Amino acid sequence: MDQSVAIQETLEREENCIIAVQCDVLFDNITESRLLGLVESTKEHAIFIYTHRRMAITADDVSLEDIIPISLDFVVVEGELLSYVVSHLSFQEEELELRLPFGSHSRLFLSEVNRAWSGRSDLRDTCMPASILNVNWQLYIGTWMEKSKRPNDDHLFPLKSHQCNKMTLQGISSREDRDDLVRSSSHTPSNKAQILAMPQFGLRDNLIKCELLKNEDLYTYLEDFSFFLGTYNVNGQTPKESLHPWLSCTPYPPDMYCVGFQELDLSKEAFFFNDTPKELEWTKAVSEALHPDAKYALVKLVRLVGIMLIFYVKKEHAEFISDVEAETVGTGIMGRMGNKGAVAIRFRFHNSDICVVNSHLAAHIEEYERRNQDYKDICGRLQFRQLDATQPPLTIMKHDVIFWIGDLNYRISELDVDNVKELISKKDFETLHNYDQLKRQIDEDAVFVGFVEGDIDFQPTYKYDTGSDKWDTSEKCRVPAWCDRILWRGKNIKQHHYQSHMALKTSDHKPVSSLLVTGRVNSEAYKKTFEEIVRNIDKMENECIPSVTLAKREFHFKDVKYMQHQAETLSLFNDGQVPCQFEFIQKPNELTYCKPWLTANPPKGFIAQGGSVEIELEVFVNRSTAPDLNSGKEQIEDILVLHLERGKDYFISVTGNYLPSCYGTSIRALCHMREPIQDMPQETLRELVSNTVNTEKPLDIPKELWMMVDHLFRNAIKQEDIFQQPGLRSEFADIRDCLDTGMPDSLPGSNHSVAEALLLFLDALPEPVVPFSFYQQCLEICSNNVSFFSLQVISMLPQCHQNVFNYLAAFLRELLKNSSSNRLDVNILATIFASLLLKSPTKQDLAEKRKTQEFFQHFLTQGST
């Protein structure tokens, strides 16, 4: 959530909040949360300090407490303490300690403050000697000078008194004395090898890594460095028992903990607003149950609705951890909702890049293909930003070691419940495992290629009656299954245990744990090998000019369709005498290297001498690119420029033909089409989009919309979890083709796939059902007589838009009449559909989202309009 929006609402017109960050402020041994905003006004900068609610959305959620102008005497001394960036703000004889969350956003905030102060940096040495400025863990970026003229006359924080030099030197000594620090992502180089290992040397670094991999036996050895991995679907419950039997089940304390939860909170508030008190409750339960024979620090916590991942490290290993980042991706309905998806944390330990993923995949025994799709979506969409902005994001598979935990939801197939329970009673888990969907999908290379899972010698972890060890006795009588799994990928990893924990009875799942031991690097041997590789690369680069051979320079993509991925492979062979670095570069007067429907993966990289690389040229048309392609204003045509560093440029032609789709076509244009869109001449489509053609009387609503709603009305009015459970991508493709070609006569696919296709159709409209020009009126109505004015606004819409709005509202009211079967309610439908029918022409904040839901709820609770 961008909390700078809330700050901006408190500012004067000439003031602008550049960036905001939440932090903890420490004074008198008490920690309190504050919101910091870097504010600019007429080329002057200041840090505004606010008290705030838990999630600052609007100005009502924040209260200005203090203002610190950035001037010559303002100093920030930055270090890293476990999971925080610790910043000491100093002015004259006062000091304030702030703890910013460890990660890229905090670093970005500090770099922006540094930029604001950089024009005055010529006076730094009056306060700090140059020797101090070079200390690698400290960053001096600016200062307080005097109080703002705002109403507050006194600092609200009790600040400690220190002279500037005294404070700085104390910081250095404390850094040398500490052994519990997490290293920053930025390092002070002491030799050439270290310089080249830094992230900003990305392409060259890749070549060095390649050579290092060939020689890793020279510097790698195994030691007892242990990871405890745990996963637990808690079914929306609060902690009711100690987690000690699960988290402290090893005889010796693990070096690190990665603990994942699913279904942390099943409430609608958590689903729609991603806010839950259970985060704190379960985090506290975890911290109290860690192994008692060691001290641990929380490095990172990340959560998406009910999917949460917590990363702890033993104190003595903290200094070897750096580059900590966290990301999330939702794979629920429309591929966005966070009720299913994944959270992940990546970090560097010594010289290894490690990624931990916690996922909750699609449910139901027959949906294994959807689970496969969720896995692929997570791998493709979850990306970590790199410190070097010129480098592409890191995907999961770009890490040396990957741990994947979670409720993967794969079930046991082809056996009825009695046969499964009989095998369990005999402890014949090997036979039972042969019917496990995940094992079968891995054997077919459908998912988790290259991953390893230990032998399963414990009984299935799902489904139990809550509070007991009894199998499900409900009416559904679920077949027991190993839903909760732990897998890994990487070298030098050994598993010491893999087990479930029957003692815990809070949920209908049982928690699972695995203890993995990994290898680590001999730093001295690594340094020696590293420097030798660098010397050889330098020699090669100075002697030769790079050159590559392209297997093909022209690519044609046939019959490109909406939201259907196509890819062609561009093969490069390094026929020169030196390793080369390549990059696709922008053409003159263009902002990016390619059109928005095209990507090259990777867009930059290196090729060793005599080596080759395959680049995927990928075409994907989405809601932002479809409108112009549908109308013929844009074509599938582009020229890519492949540049070799210190070499020449190569030109690659990309062409194709796009099949127009109702997805991304306006309501008005579709109402003037009585034939399927792919039967319409291109010139007619162009005229319809530009409003230059008058046809016979238009349809009341688009026929494509009618087909989907009619199908759902006849087949899915009582469908459980309709509009909440996603469909299959393969079925969406069939539905799209049916709508665009008119064949077959009836829609294919499951009810869930048709429902998601309807949502995607509304999401892709170039102009939403309630046009952008009416958006502000709808928001203002929420403060007045909603009943009267909402009807009035809808009556003013263009006729085709008005018809669609009323048609959809009537259909949704019919769904609500069957809520006992489909489990829908007004809040769910208003949340899902308001965001599609009423879109903001600019970025929409949470307060606006709630107003649009309030507006649309009126049409769901009132009679026919």
Image: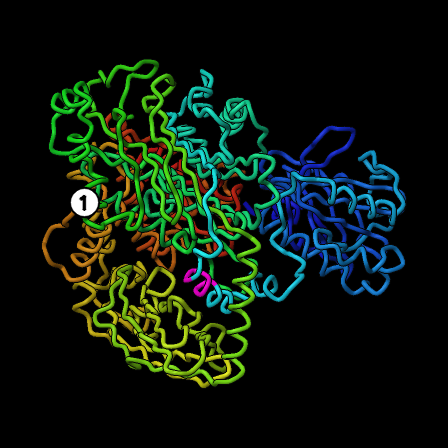
State the residue at coordinates (36%, 48%).
378
In this picture, residue 860 sits left or right of residue 292? left
Of residues 664 and 157, the one nearer the viewer is 157
Q: What residue type is labelled 1?
A: Asp
The image position of residue 500, as x and y in percent, is 33, 25
From the top left corner, tell me how far across and down residue 71 is, in percent.
83, 56
Q: How crowded is mark 1: few (under 14 residues within 10 Å), some or many (20 or more)?
A: few
Secondary structure state at the residue bearing disc 1? helix
Q: What stretch is highlighted in magenta?
A: 209-214
Q: Residue at the location (48% across, 77% down)?
A: 590
When the figure is inspected, residue 477 is found, relative to residue 745, above or below; the finding is above
In front: 7, or 599? Answer: 599
**Between residues 551 and 340, which one lies in front from this camera angle?**
551
Q: Is residue 475 visible?
A: yes
Mark 1 lies on residue: 710
Q: Identify the residue at image location x=40%, y=83%.
A: 576
> Main SS of the magenta segment?
helix
Question: Which of the pair 47/649 is nearer the observer?
Answer: 649
Left or right, residue 219 beside residue 658: right
